[in-house]
Image (cartoon, rainbow, N blue to C red):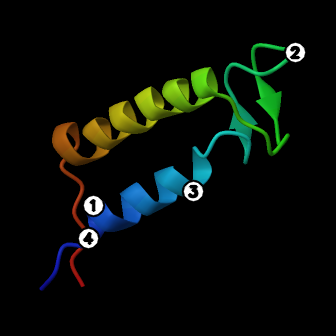
Amino acid sequence: MNDWAASLIAAALFALLSPGLVFQMPGKERPVDFVNMKTSLPSMFIHLLIYGLLLVLFLVILHLHLYV
């Protein structure tokens, strides 16, 4: 049996938290822009922090597992 939770959670978070895809924080003109498909260095750094914190939450704190 393989544990697929880490791979699926990481891929889903990476897709959803790509700067500019769903939202961009900080935005160009507002604190949060939605679906503008543009990015900046501060935005990439903020999304990196959110991504890392959510990965730690799901994988280390909550111990999620999906066995196939």
Q: Which residue is mark 2?
A: 29
Q: Quadrant of the C terminus?
A: bottom left
Q: Secondary structure at mark 4?
A: loop
Amino acid type of the residue that numbered disc 3 sits on in the rendered structure: Ala
Residue 65: percent from left, percent from top: 22, 63
Q: CA distance from mark 2 to mark 3?
A: 24 Å
How many other residues sit within 10 Å of disc 4, few (<14), some (14-19) or many (≥20)?
A: few
Q: Which residue is mark 3?
A: 15
Which of the 4 image quarters holds residue 19? top right
Is 21 positioned to the left or the right of 12 in the image? right
Amino acid type of the residue that numbered disc 1 sits on in the rendered structure: Ala
Q: Are marks 4 and 3 in contact (CB under 8 Å)?
A: no
Q: Secondary structure at mark 3?
A: helix
Q: Which residue is mark 1?
A: 6
Amino acid type of the residue that numbered disc 2 sits on in the rendered structure: Glu
Q: Which residue is mark 4?
A: 66
Determine the residue positioned at 81% across, 28% down: 33
